Amino acid sequence: MGAPSFPRFLGERAIRRQQDDVCRTFAEQASRSGAKSSGHHNQNYVLALTEQMARVVGREPGTSVTVRVRRAEVLPVVIRTWPNEAEILQAVRGALPHAPECLLQREDFAIHSYVEGVPLSGVCGNGKPVDPLLVEAMAQLLARMTQVRREALPKLPEGWPRKGSRSFLQTLAHLADGQIRQPNWAEFGGLFASLGVPDDALTRFAERVPAMARRPYSLLHADLHRDNLIVSYGGQPPLICVDWELATYGDPLHDLATHLVRMRYPEYQEAEVIEAWATAMGHVRPAAVNGLDRDLRRYLAFERAQSLYPDVMRAARSLQQSFSPKALDDATAAVDRALRHAAEPLGLRVLPTEADIERVLFRWQSSRLNGRAGTGRYVAVGWERDRRFQARDEFPDRAVSDALLAEGRAPAHRVFKGTGHLNTVVRVPGSDRAVVVRRKADDACRRERSFLSEHAVLGAIEAANVPVAVPRVLALGESYQHEPFAVHTYVGPQDANEPPDHPVNGLRLHEADALVDQLCALTRVDYRQLDPAPAEENWSFFPWLCDQLVRLVDGLPKSSQQLARMLGLPDSERLRLILSRHVVTDRSPALLHGDLNPWNLVRRPDELALTVIDWEMAMVGDPLYDLVRHMHLTPTRSEIRERMFRRWARSLPSSHTEGWARDWHVYRGIEIVRSAYVDLDRLVTRSSLDAPNVRRALEGYAMTLAAASASLGLPIRATANPYLARALA
């Protein structure tokens, strides 16, 4: 039988239906023939045209074509400027006549003319040097793209920058956030939050883009790697670009940067490639080379930054195919590599260890296995109860397992990373209340020591039955790789879309009264079961507190100590001598929270007004100290401060308050000095900068330093480097 002639009497609509049937059959035949290569969203097959298909596309039967079939369930991990690749190919044919031609376009597949040749990856794999003649041909190919007229290209999206390299790079960063991060955040946001990647990392990158040299815009391929470069059989031209789906319009330096990153040249050959590009571009469009030496690194930084998201998501998704030990090791290594490459451009100050990454990935994938065994020898969830904590009937082992499973599925807005803990808010099936899974943050660099076990402190408060609003410990144990965890009741809003409300700008009147009342109630908790030392006759809180501060300063890294000396802060021995001049009245000790910053207070609607969370820094000591430290860490107006002191002094017996009016200034000075050292160390080590209380403290470090120097009775030293003083201000 001959090929159908599609007679006209059938009508245009019937002819179209017959053509669609032929095309669909041909595409299905291509899918069964074996894949040639994979693109970002397409699977590419090479097939000879059948007689029926040849009539549809107007080519000779037997002609080879490339059938591009859209891949199902592909993560959105690329930036797209134009939705239709066929329009891009039509635009480039004038300047690049050997580029593929789109012969037919349908919603889920397309047919392109076949480019004769072999992919560069087939003759020269990633990491291997490329022949200098091919490097020169590649550079000339990129230069020829500048000859494509703007008028020939498809319409640009609304708001596309008209000129300016800085504007273009900022646009790329916002597009990466909108097209890569945001569509995947519902599934992967909790994973990124657990790894320490904030949701505004790309937005911040855009804000930090500096002024750049001006270069004329042109067409960019934006995905020129070894699979997309075809070495032609005839040699004229030597190289042909395929896969134009990610093409864009902007600064040509961006094309060079993406090419350098995705080609994976040996490091020593990169300078050769850059020089070849500059030479070729200089002959065609000299202005495109402006600022090359300075601005290329900006685009390279962007490539490393935006690549973090697809690299991490692909690594996590790979565990769905195999959850074996090797697969987990490979995924961990890929995530670690992506984080290290993106750390500087995205401003990720402290990175998780490989062990921490492995645990995060394990929790993430275990939750998706829904408690069943994986394809390897791992079991989706497993944990051991801490024998120090008695199981609660209201939260049995099954509830703990359910909470750990839900932890890996938690969205980003329910994952809270503080200076010492990673907290994940989850819901357990069968319960109408949320709980929080609390883990130590492996990347925490806390200089201030913890003295008491948090679960023991919360247990003592609960046993005392005093009006202090705190979370209740529901479970304590170890999960994968013996990582400790705790499950607490969650004290924030039960609505999953509302964050906890913290008094970050200071306490309201009724909150100030309520906090004082709770601090007074803490004095009725029996602290001797937690720390018996303060009950001894010769124990004194203030000398102990000064000794802890001196030890903190002595234990700082050398780099932090060196900068402290440069800024005029005393070393540990001199600090001990200065502090020894102070005398503070001995008052009856009590249980203290030790870190009453506003983010450790959560507003509540009842008469208690505030719930006090994060008891990891709890200690036993002078109750005046807890109140003064709170006022140091929280914006407190003078009238609120006086109100709190008056209520506190009236509510407690004299054994807790004697001499407070004289001594509170001493404690305030101690805390200012402590902040001067701790915050300086954070500036040097860049640790815990994502915690909101740390960010706010560092913003005012110059004032902290001046106040600490005054408190110590020392002059403010003029630093040898005036730029350092300006930076600290």
Image (cartoon, helix red, strand yellow):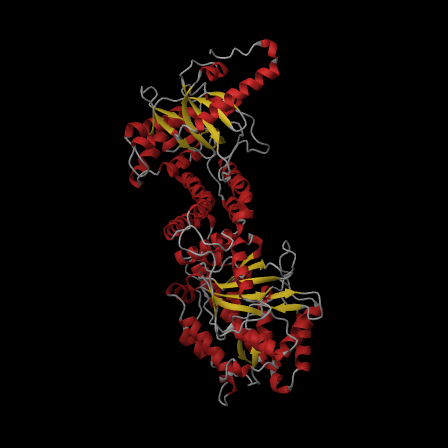
Locate residue 569: give its quadrant: bottom left
State whether residue 177 is above or below residue 721. above
Of residues 307 and 661, which is closer to you in this image? 307
- Can residue 449 be seen in this snapshot? yes
Above or below residue 120? Residue 497 is below
* Whole-percent x, y for residue 109 in the image: 50, 27
Is residue 289 in sight in this rendering? no
- Nearest the eye: 707 or 626: 626
Q: Residue at x 53, y 72 (%)?
A: 455
Percent x, y for residue 409?
53, 53
Residue 30 drawn at (x, y percent) = 44, 26
328 or 644, which is in the foreground? 328
Out of 93 and 185, give the one closest to the viewer.
185
Q: How many marks?
A: 0
> Where is 360 relative to 27, above or below?
below
Q: In the image, what residue occupies the spot 32% across and 30% down?
A: 135
Q: Is residue 274 above or below residue 418?
A: above
Indicate the position of residue 374 as horizontal and vertical percent values: 44, 52
Position of residue 665 in the picture relative to residue 310 (left or right): right
Image check: 541 left or right of 143? right
Q: Residue furthest bottom?
A: 537
